Amino acid sequence: MKKAVVVGSGAGGATIAKELQGSYDVTVLEAGRAFKRLESDLGFLEKMRNLGLFFDEREIHLAFPAYHVRKADHMILLNGIGTGGSTTISTGNALRMDGDLKELGIDLEAEFAEIFSEIPVTTAHERGWRKPTRRMFSIFEQQGLRPQPTPKMGEYERCAHCGRCQLGCPFGVKWDSRRFLEVAVNRGAEVIEGCSVRSVAIEDGRALGVWVEDHWTRNFIPADLVVLAAGGFATPLILERSGIACEPNLFVDPVLCVAARSPHCRLHREVAMPFISTADHIILSPYFDHLSFFFNRQWRLPVDDIVSIMIKLSDERVGSISNRGVDKMLTAQDRSHLDNGVSVCKEILQRFGASENEMFLGTVIAGHPGGMLPLTANESTTLHSDRLPNNLYVADATLLPKSLGNPPILTIIALAKRIARLCLEL
């Protein structure tokens, strides 16, 4: 049987592994270790914060290894590392965001239909919303913002509204890509954890396998097919080290939270992003920002007394990541969209009962990187760049032509399903 190496076990990688195993002998290489949710109680961590023990966002990796943090231009760049990739620390949103792909001539209708038959998608969490969330939803409606309950991946009729979606669901409610990974393993795939891929070995226009690093050793893993699904930060680095140039089109979907003091609102106990409102280049949603709570001095309030609204931005495609580091900043247009969002959020919080002198901003955090090998109309049937050998594919947000400004997991899974079918035709 032909051998396939899949780099990454997130939305794209786990999907590819599930679809290919059986036709290929699949090995999944994951740079991180097995995902472990954050067990610590927020009250305990709050006491540590108040003692001044948290002073740099990169410290979060010590308590929660699934969070991988970089910094660029006053932004915190966040992605998941470990089995399941960023899906384990996501909010579980199931939004179909393939409009830009359709404009290129890429029709993923069949793939989305398949996804909805495999992954439970529901808004059942709405039945358990607490009073502050329902009140916030009404204020959004009164403001003409047309909020919609957010469809979630998983069995949300069992949601306990513990607010720990991004820290690892304690009840197994939220779907993440480890479920697809488990299917692949049950079919015979192998998963190797703690395996960092350095580069793809290419000779005479063909990928021969990958070079991996383990501490001080370097090993070669041969393959007939290589699929890079290491995420929008890691995949471009692997391509660069393999001699394949990417485009300086990095987007990151920055998030800025506008928060206020609201005694006993307990937003941190609500399902993350319970509803979404879409505006010009941004979306708005109630959201408790854990990184700002731990590391931003303006958030030094009791955890029960903070209400906050997320602004997620569809940022301009200006930036890159390379072995020299991340070159990414917000443009004047990006900052203008964020400023407009801040104004809207402040008005909502005032209607919620917060006073303006008790409002504060979070840290700008970005966690949906992509765009550095964007698909074009010429690649609408192949989903494959001419820069790549025929047996080397990319299957993550690196392919997206521009920022979605929305959670990308469902769209990445659909792309990965199509790419898997194309790989089966090789």
Image (cartoon, rainbow, N blue to C red):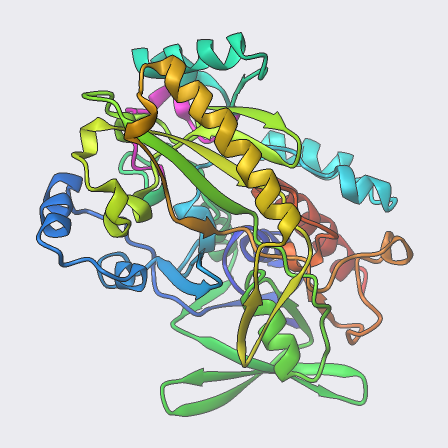
Q: Measuring 81% from the left and 60% from the top, which residue is drawn there?
A: 425
Q: Quadrant of the rendered structure where residue 108 is?
A: top right
Q: Quadrant of the rendered structure where residue 145 is?
A: top right
- Residue 353 on image: x %, y %: 32, 14
**In this view of the protein, which residue sits in the foreground, 351 or 183?**
351
Relative vertical location of residue 161 with respect to residue 297 in this rendering, above or below:
above
Quick check: 170 left or right of 393? Answer: left
Q: Quadrant of the rendered structure where residue 307 is?
A: top left
- The stretch in magenta equals 151-165
- Residue 21 on image: x %, y %: 60, 58
Is residue 159 part of the magenta span, yes or no? Answer: yes
Quick check: 196 left or right of 145? Answer: left
Where's the C terminus, which quadrant? bottom right
- Residue 240 on image: x %, y %: 65, 79
**In this view of the protein, which residue sits in the foreground, 336 or 27?**
336
Is residue 135 visible in the rendered image? The answer is yes
Where's the N terminus, which quadrant? bottom right
Is residue 98 part of the magenta span, yes or no? Answer: no
Quick check: 368 left or right of 202? Answer: left
Is residue 315 visible in the rendered image? The answer is no
Relative vertical location of residue 387 with respect to residue 309 in this rendering, above or below:
below
- Residue 106 on image: x %, y %: 83, 45
Would you say the magenta stretch is mainly helix, strand or loop? loop
